Amino acid sequence: MRLYQAALLAVWPLLAASQASLDQARQHYQHTDYDASLKVLEAIEPKDGPVLAMMGRNHYMQGEYKKATEILEKATAADPANSDYELWLGRAFGRRAETASPFAAPSHANKARQHFEKAVQLNPRNLEALSDLFEYYLQAPGFLGGGLDKAAGAADRMAVLDPAQGQWAQARMAAHNKDFGSAEEHLRKAAELSPQQAGHWIDLARFLAKRGRYAESERSFGQAEKIAPNSPQLLYARADTYIEQGRELAAARLLLKRYLEAQLTPDDPSRAEAEKLLKKASGG
């Protein structure tokens, strides 16, 4: 017993230091400073599942998808029961499929699907994994494991976990089938079910703008602004919508400049994407 206690006392400072470093790396990641996060992570030894998973996510955010899959595979091997590790590995393979040659893309796409499915199998309440799997089923052709029937099944499961997200999924399927009337109904229902979530009002605003209903779109954007007036998500989405429609370009430029000055998170479009959009709005 004393030997065990002595060993624990000897190891504890190292464990505490590793956890402190991992927390620091996560803070850098949340502030989109991926280089700084990786620098901290690379110094941590030994590299267990959480460290490897965070390294993989940093490489993913930097667009280094091959490296991300290699490291995330090590994370899943270290903790095979972790749903989030499988989710991020699926995302990385999905990006590799999007950027690969026509010969390599199908293999990567199938791996993405398999890891999304594994993530949901490991944790059926993982809404992010279920949402990504739904998107895969909706977009992928049948020979890659996609299909509307599978998407509908995933949408039903999403609705059980989050009724508003279930309505959003129904809207995506309706729009995919060009049933725009039903799509609008589902988007409005999603906003009604979660009136304090700006994201659903933004989705509705973007949908209405694409249908040429600009006044209604502005009202939905206005509702989102009341909920989250300084949301980077809102700034970017509104600017992107204006530019896509070829209108309000001066306002779009101002919104993007505000966006570039905001504190972004990994969930927001990158500054590089915003700068590219700003150049487009400026006629570049």
Image (tube, rainbow, N blue to C red):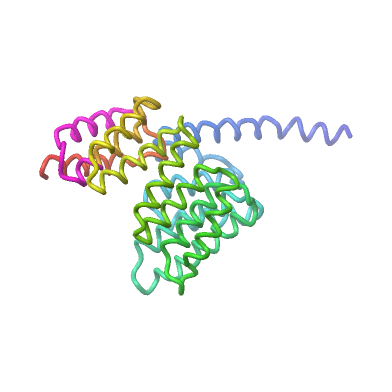
Q: Nearer the viewer, residue 68 or 145?
A: 145
Kindly report the secondary structure that dominates the magenta region of the rendered protein.
Answer: helix
Which is more toward the observer, 257 or 152? 152
> Residue 171 location, x and y as percent?
42, 51
Q: Residue at x 30, y 39 (%)?
A: 237
Residue 47 position in % (x across, y down):
59, 46
Q: Left or right: 254 with respect to 217? A: left
Question: Which residue is nearer to you in this view: 45 or 270?
Answer: 270
In the image, residue 169 sits, relative to residue 262, either above or below, namely: below
Quadrant location of the C terminus in the rendered image: top left
Residue at the image position 20 percent from the left and 30 percent from the top: 254
Name which quarter of the figure residue 51 lies in.
top right
Report the magenta residues as a range.
241-263
Relative to 200, is 275 on the left or the right?
Answer: left
- Residue 174, image x and y in percent? 40, 56
In this view, the residue farthest toward the right is 1
